[in-house]
């Protein structure tokens, strides 16, 4: 018996809030450096704290999501700045109730009792798919699926995958 395996990497588009955070941190860092040099050397400790914050926060703002689909299970990981990787979720498709594009009428019956989680590119030009998990999880997970992964999911769950 052959295994179905598909892997997909989706780069999240930079958000406005990410750019604002970067700009604010950079301005504060420069101001703290200037204030430490010209006003009071004690402010240089604030500068060092801001440099460390920049070092820790900036890589977290560049995110790629990696989806690995193997025989009914999707593993999701976040790759930060193409350097560090963090496992985010493992979704068992036996608990899936529906997979449909965002805004589809097939998702209308899954209301506010479901927790929403977004692992998509957040690109308005490219609609994500919503994976609705039932059971104990009760989640609506947004994923940026490609045609290969959709074909594999449709093969495994023909009555639950909708492409509208």
Image: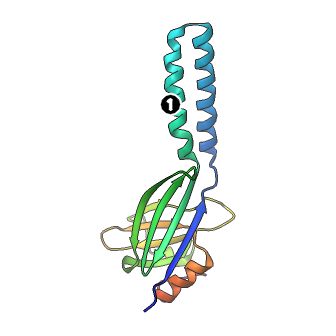
Q: Nearer the viewer, residue 109 or 115?
A: 115
Relative to 162, residue 135 above or below: above
Q: Colour scheme in the image?
A: rainbow
Q: Position of residue 111 (x, y in %)?
A: 43, 68
Q: Which quadrant, please, contains the N terminus?
A: bottom left
Q: Is residue 22 left or right of residue 46?
A: right
Residue placed under numbered mark 1 in the picture: 52
Q: Is residue 117 left or right of residue 61?
A: left
Q: Residue at x 57, y 84 (%)?
A: 151
Q: Position of residue 21 (x, y in %)?
A: 58, 37
Q: Residue at x 46, y 64 (%)?
A: 76
Quarter of image, res 164: bottom right
Q: Residue at x 55, y 7 (%)?
A: 40
Q: Nearer the viewer, residue 76 or 14?
A: 76
Element type at mark 1: helix
Q: Position of residue 91 (x, y in %)?
A: 40, 70
Report the residue that reaches farthest toward the top: 39
Q: Nearer the viewer, residue 62 or 145?
A: 62
Q: Position of residue 122 (x, y in %)?
A: 60, 58
Quarter of image, res 97: bottom left
């Amino acid at each position: 018996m052959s295994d179905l395996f598909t892997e997909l990497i989706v780069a999240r588009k930079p958000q406005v809030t990410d750019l604002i955070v970067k700009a604010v941190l950079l301005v504060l860092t420069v101001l703290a450096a200037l204030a430490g040099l010209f006003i009071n050397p004690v402010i240089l400790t604030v500068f060092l704290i801001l440099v460390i914050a920049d070092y820790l926060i900036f890589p977290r703002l560049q995110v790629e999501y990696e989806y690995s689909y193997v025989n009914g299970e999707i593993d999701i990981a976040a790759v930060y700045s193409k350097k560090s990787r963090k496992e985010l979720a493992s979704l068992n498709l036996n608990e899936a109730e529906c997979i449909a594009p965002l805004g589809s009428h097939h998702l209308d019956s899954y209301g506010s009792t479901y927790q929403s989680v977004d692992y998509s590119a957040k690109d308005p030009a490219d609609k994500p798919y919503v994976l609705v998990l039932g059971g104990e999880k009760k989640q609506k997970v947004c994923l940026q699926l490609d045609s290969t992964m959709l074909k594999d999911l449709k093969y495994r769950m023909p009555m639950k995958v909708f492409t509208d």
